[in-house]
Image (cartoon, helix red, strand yellow):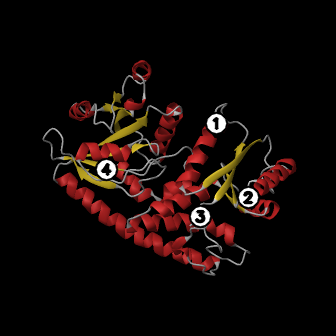
Amino acid sequence: MAKNRAFLVIAEPPGKSKNFLRESFEEIKELTLSAGGQVVGVTEARLERPSPSHYVREGKLGEIQEKVSKEKADLVIFNIDLTPVQARNIEESVGVRAVDRTGLILDIFARRAQSREGKLQVEVAQLNYLLPRLVGLGVILSRLGGGIGTRGPGEQKLEVDRRRIRERIAKLKEDLEKLERHRSLIRQGRQRRNFLSVAIVGYTNAGKSTLLNALTGAQAFVEDKLFATLDPLTRVSKMNGRRDVLFTDTVGFLRDLPHGLIEAFKSTLEEATDADFLLHVLDLSSPYADAQKEAVEKTLEEIGAGGKPLILALNKSDLISPEELQNLAEKYPDGIVISAKNREGLDRLFEKFETGGRQR
């Protein structure tokens, strides 16, 4: 299947930091690539007062239409969330599909989910997202054509009404509650056997799965894309002769992670809230490490894991010069410098577990 030709619109709402446009562009570009798209153009839009009808103003909308036509783009992707009315009006004006940030993230989640629980969680989030966007539109779950932003539950072109969508959501939540109870029983069994549980958390693509593999000898899927791991994977440590440390790789966090996703993945995120330790993996090589660290800490607070003992792993040291590495180590004095890829610094992590980590 040919890649979608995506034109990016990087909007800067009022009150954002001076680095917002650049950070947001890098993020939405990576998300687009992770969704299998090809970026063919980009424009920026600084907005004091977003338009209720199209988000961007008439002049910028005309510019987008012109560039989309010139680059032969087949969809336009916004770095912010659009209302159903805004998305519909943009599509009518520009002549191609409009996908917002949450819609793009959901598309990636639909591609990445492997377990039954993961697929159920994605479908709940998708239906809640789609519900207000389907009213009065013929109520078609998946549009003709396919591609980014069209990967609906089951990818079926089903005509449904609001009542049936809500019934489906209720059934999915019921199934998730059963799986959640099963997961809870497993956690209780681990506690009775006195396992030390460690949840590996961090910004998406920080190297969590690579670290899990290095610590346990697991074969977790690793790919240089955002949200390469969606389903939690738990493995027993094989280092230092220990057989009583359980490491769980969790879904990657993201700046301003949509509340609907946090709610949908509540049972998966409970792996972090119920763990004895949090192992926060920070990508030292990212120019946005500070912002990513802050985003993870904010999400941990939101899910009720803010007070957990936490160990900060400063990952990807192999990508940084010795001088820069020293400066970063001084910047994050509580962190432990590691390279999960080269298996460097892992013994120090275990020493930290032995001494109880640090309380935030």
- Residue type, numbered disc 2: Lys
Question: Can you identify the residue that label 1 sits on?
Answer: 22
Tell me if 20 is positioned left or right of 242 in this view.
Answer: right
Q: Are marks 3 and 4 in contact (CB under 8 Å)?
A: no
Residue 308 in sight from this viewpoint = no
| Residue 177 percent coordinates (x, y) | 39, 67
Q: CA distance from mark 1 to mark 3?
A: 28 Å
Among the 4 quarters of the image, the one containing residue 15: top right
Front-lying residue, 19 or 37? 37
Position above or below: 26 against 263: above
Tell me if 313 is positioned left or right of 85 in this view.
Answer: left
Q: Which mark is residue 2?
A: 3
| Residue 41 percent coordinates (x, y) | 70, 48
Question: Can you identify the residue that label 2 sits on?
Answer: 72
Which one is earlier in the sequence, the residue at label 1 or at label 4?
A: 1
- Residue type, numbered disc 4: Thr
Secondary-structure class at tag 2 = loop
Q: Residue at x 36, y 70 (%)?
A: 178
